[in-house]
Image (cartoon, coloured by chain):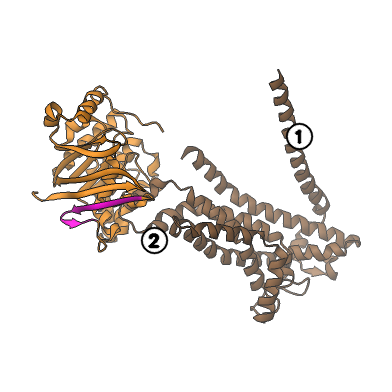
Amino acid sequence: MKRKVIHHVCRSITGLCALACCGVLVGIVGFIVMRGWSALSWEFFTEQIALVGAAGGILYNVIGTLILLATALLVCTPLALAFAIVHSVYLRDSPHRGRLTVLLYVLNGVPSILFGIVGMVIFVQMLGWGKSWLSGGILLGLMILPTVTVTLIERITSLPGRYLEAATGLGLSQSQIIRSVILPQSLSGLVTGLMLGLARAAGETAPIMFTATIFAGATIPSGVKESPVLSLPYHIFVLAQDSFDPAVKAKLWGAALVLLMLVLGLSLIALPARLKIHEEANHG
Amino acid sequence: MDDPVFKTVDLSVSAGSKTILSPVSLDIAGGGVFGIIGPSGAGKSTFLKSLNRLTELSQGLRVTGQAYFEGQPVYDSAVDPDELRGRIGILFQQPVVFPSSILANTLFGVRHLGVVPKRDLPEVAERALRQAALWDEVKDRLKKPGQQLSVGQQQRLCLARTLATGTHTILMDEPTSALDPKSTEAIEALILNLKTTHSIVLVTHNLRQTERVCDKIAFIGIRDDVGTMLATGELADLKCCSGIPELEEYLCCELEETRPKLATK
């Protein structure tokens, strides 16, 4: 009898906690959708910013954010692949492996504002790029490197050993095994990690506000030096400071909703790959 | 056919300070099927994998002594283990089919070894699948995933993959222990067919299988807690009068199990 009571109490508490979590999530999303929905229109996506954000649309903010994300993707992918392969293939039996893991977690813990100021010193001042989409993309790529690498490492280390044994038994060299067994089978891990990482990078303001993005006056960059872009998170950041103006406020929530949809979209792309991993873990 | 395909001289395997297999000196004649029998955990598979240096994948296993494959030393710094393994086929207990098509699986090894020009690959695949008696079952669905095949078919696919590399020597590590009786029969028929052209070393748990396909056998038993090669010869001789207590105990108990075991997954 007592056990039953405890069971029900525990179940109720955990249920309530889960419900609270869902409530907060739905609340935030609902709030943004309610406030932002009215600002969405065809013009909002196709016009550029006007009247210091009180009018016009966010065309170049979306494009700028997409440029930053694409650059981050290109920077992060080869680094994460190399890191994960060194970590879980070449250093499989080495004590250095643990050190690399610590390094990844430290990198993961570096606050994003520090990426911003380090990037400012290196790219803006030492290299003299001024504000450039490239520095922002590189910084975002490095920032999501731990997320992507860890996801990839988890995927590689969970590969069944029998595949490696069979491939080795057939006479394949280690590099051939990496190319034809390990990489193809951990692709879903790479995609998952990248999408989760990019979803996070899309909303980051601190690493790009000193290095890559400005509020108005940029379109599509044509070079590297002095080629800033507009971006969604920085746009929201600036508009939020002016939000006493109702016209600005409407645009602010519109931009917030677009950013939310972008992040949601990226997470949804990762979903099939994640489900596939689960399926293999359960039936493999 | 006179030269042994494998020859081991004091080949032993240890893990840390524990000896897993005490020194084995053995000649395995070329051609035919050489069986290795013995109780579980005696080190049959370990011995088999030490012949093509697959033991090196297992962290902490150390091999001492020497083995010769076709007269050439296996454990030598001048030997490229990948090249060696490419010349010796191997079949595992559980068929290992990669998550790709039947055709890609068949060509998985030969494609990477780079011994066959690309345009000849389809022909190689067909020949290997025919040799493994799988061609008629899969010829219309070569592009379908290999993992959709039944376990018995998967094992034959693995055999085809090994045969496609052009090897004349195949190590088999209990290749039928995961299979149902009918698939086991199919694999045994293949072994009997292949032994005219290939040298096969077959680790098995199943004495009936040994009787059906093996020409000569070696018995690895557990003596003083260590796997030890206790007898070699023809099964009939060993059966009647080996005088080895471990072997007699093994024979009496194993013969009661007439059906091949189905591995639990």
Q: Is residue B104 visible?
A: no
Q: Residues within 10 Å of mark 1 (few under 14, many from 20)?
A: few
Question: Is B23 on the left or on the right of A36, as rendered?
Answer: left
Residue at the disc numbered 1:
A16
Residue B185 appears at what percent x and percent y?
A: 24, 31
Identify the image quadrant of residue A104.
bottom right
Chain under numbered label 2: A
Q: What stretch of residues is rendered in magenta?
A: B61-74
Question: Is A272 on the left or on the right of B18, as rendered?
Answer: right
Question: Is B6 on the left or on the right of B119, as rendered?
Answer: left
The span from disc 1 to disc 2 (Cα, nearest Å) is: 51 Å
Discs 1, 2: same chain: yes
Q: Main secondary structure of the magenta part?
A: strand
Instruction: Using the image, determine if residue B88 lies above or below residue A111.
Output: above
Identify the image quadrant of residue B182.
top left
Which circle's residue, 1 or 2, is located before the other in the chain? Answer: 1
Residue A279 appears at what percent x and percent y?
A: 52, 41
Q: Colour of chain B?
A: orange
Identify the image quadrant of residue A182.
bottom left
Q: Colour of chain A?
A: brown
Task: Give the residue type at disc 2.
Answer: Ser
Instruction: Using the image, determine if residue B136 lies above or below residue A108.
Output: above
Residue at the disc numbered 2:
A175
Q: Residue at x 18, y 57 (%)?
A: B72
